Amino acid sequence: MGRRIRPPVGVPFVKVPLLAFAALLIAGCTPGPQDALAPVGPVGVLESNLYNLIFWIAVVVFVIVEGLLVYTIYRYRRRGDDGMPRQTHGNTALELTWTIIPCLILIGIAVPTLTTIASAATVPPGGDTLNVQVYGHQWWWEFDYPAQKIVTADELHIPVGTKIALSVQSKDVIHSFWVPKLGGKIQAIPGRDNTMWFQADQVGEYYGQCYQLCGTSHANMRFRVFVQSKADFDKWVADQQAVPTKPTDAEAAKGAQVFSTGPCVACHTIAGTNANAKIGPDLTHFGSRTTIAGALLDNNPKNLAMWLHDPPGVKPGSLMPNYHLTDDQVNALVAYLESLK
Ligand code: CUA
């Protein structure tokens, strides 16, 4: 004598926004330049394998638990005036089972997690290794190559198929260094070197991002990794090691004058000039970079002029203030900085 169950009247109206929400969620899953599940090196592969293992364990647990729940709700639903069902208080066998199974699952996750953490932190022996010291700043990244004596900003160049040993630190607050397709992430902490390594197995340009909320322009603290053939990388190193020649172009020469006599020298370095401060990015080879302002904008004269006119207007909170430079000063600085290849 069971009664038919009718769905509540409101269901279709609930479904529409739910479906729209699900579609939005799925849209966020479209593979992009920061897709950690499409790795291009051994550390990225290790980390995405770990993710996949845990994901599929979670799927199995979800299906079993929700399946049992839905079955129980349906099978033991109230049918007519049955009265109160039999009441139970505890079931030792059942409770032991649902304690022991999750313990085994957690151990099954912990073992590969710990081995992955150890593998990602320590450079395996053998072969060439390139050492890079990474510093997080509000809001840009500094990359120092101690053996090559190169310092650059926001754009890390590395040779393909080579182990890159990274030592990551911060100059101010806590940041987090992450190149999703190559590996990471690791915290950049003031006064403490955290180490990790990665290797890129394909030439290309990879996107990185600060992953620790670090102030106003946290979301604007981006960087790029350029993976080059061994020959291209060696050429880049040689270019970066060269001291730029004095500008011959009249506008650029004027810009050099504005730079060396203005407030710029209080924060920046340009090799071969009087500018040797370490607060802002090293600009020695500024013109060779593809991006500016924490990899926020493409490096071109228009964007650079916009930046110089009002840095905090481009990157909110920027420690480089608005110096209210004249159009003439900005144009000369643009010509000079872009000449620094
Ligand atoms: Cu640096 Cu977020």
Image (cartoon, rainbow, N blue to C red):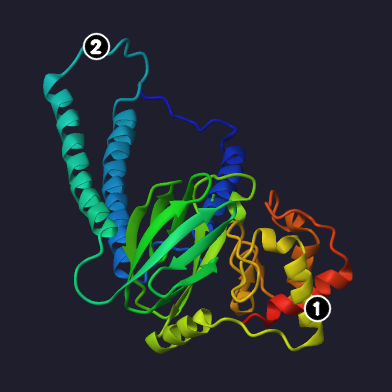
Q: Is 291 situated left or right of 133 in this image?
A: right
Which quadrant of the view contains residue 315?
bottom right
Residue 259's x, y, as percent?
Answer: 74, 69
Q: At 31% from the left edge and 42% from the top edge, which residue is drawn?
A: 62
Question: Badge 1: how crowded within 10 Å, few (<14), some, or many (20+)?
Answer: some
Element at badge 1? helix
Residue 303's x, y, as percent?
Answer: 74, 70
Q: How many numbered marks have been drawn onto this rendered protein structure?
A: 2
Residue type at mark 1: give it. Answer: Lys
| 172 vs 303, nearest the viewer | 172
Mark on residue 88? none
Q: Which residue is mark 1?
A: 254
Q: Is 151 situated left or right of 59 in this image?
A: right
CA gap between label 1 and label 2 equals 90 Å
Q: Please identify the residue farthest to the front as the structure is shown.
A: 274
Residue type at mark 2: give it. Answer: Gln
Residue 273's x, y, as percent?
Answer: 65, 73
> Quadrant where the N terminus lies?
top left
| Residue 30 visible somewhere in the drawing | no
Q: Which residue is mark 2?
A: 87
Q: At 69% from the left edge and 48% from the top edge, which residue is drawn?
A: 317
